[in-house]
Image: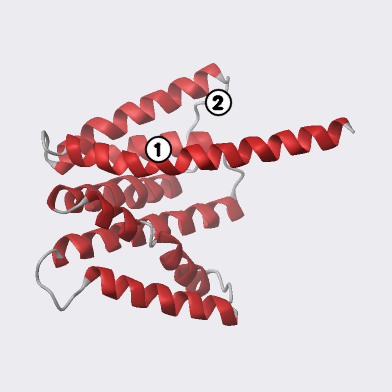
Amino acid sequence: MATEATSKRTRDLGILALVVLGPVWGYGWVATKVALDFSDALTFAALRVPLSAALLFLAMLVARRPLRPPPLGWTMLVGLLQTTLFMGLVLTALHDTGAGRVSVLTYTMPFWLLLLAWTFLGERLRGAQWLAVTLAFTGLVLVVRPWAFDGVVSGVLTVLGGASWAASALVVKLLQRRHTVDVLSLTAWQMLLGSV
């Protein structure tokens, strides 16, 4: 009985977390857009990421987790893809276009990850997944509007940011196949290395 109650409570907390997380993430784009009125994109990233990494290292200390970095080459690659490229591309695009458009295009990440996993991990797409990929690609073209010249550059930068995010997720999956990795440590170290 206690296990059932604990399971229900855990499920309810998970649902609550998702309900709260959506608006927080959504409003985060708006807040970042406002902040970019006072800073250029790369300066903003250079200030934001090391502070976030420092907070993660503090969390590691508090949790008494080892500060030793995960395998350095892999961690540097994740940092390059996730922190340097993703943050740089998306913040540069956000500086020049609307938060709504950038957020929609950034979250094409699962679309790119699906294609990368199919290509590099041999994960196969099934019938409905192919339909989803086709619809996602069609929607992507309609949002980027390559036939209209206004906003194409920021659209392409954002899509590249989403693809970079997907590539970093692929690298993390490959890393986890080869090594046991503490996710908090990997996140902190990749942020630190990616911000350098």
Residue beneath disc 2? 66
Sequence-wise, which precedes: disc 1 or disc 2?
1
Answer few, some or many: residues within 10 Å of disc 1's Cα (few below 14, many 20 plus, some between 14 and 19).
Answer: few
Horizontal side, residue 29 vs residue 17: left or right:
left
Q: Quadrant of the C terminus?
A: top left
Figure coloring: secondary structure
Q: Residue at x 51, y 80 (%)?
A: 130
Residue at 42% over, 77% down: 135
Query: Left or right: 62 with respect to 189?
Result: right
Tell me the element at label 2.
loop
Q: Type of residue at label 2? A: Pro
Residue beneath label 1, please?
A: 24
Give the distance between the C-alpha atoms of the residues marked 1 and 2, in whole angstroms: 30 Å
> Tag count in the figure?
2
The residue at 38%/55% (across/down) is 165
Q: Position of residue 46 (x, y in %)?
A: 22, 35
Q: Pick whichever, 128 or 119, lies toward us.
A: 128
Q: Is residue 150 above or below residue 39?
A: below
Location of residue 118 in the rendering, given as x and y in whole percent from the top left corner: 52, 73
Observer able to see residue 196? no
Residue situated in front as seen by the camera: 45 or 127: 127
Residue drawn at the location 31% of the way across and 60% of the way down: 105
For the residue pair 24 and 46, the one nearer the viewer reads as 24
Picture disc at residue 63: none
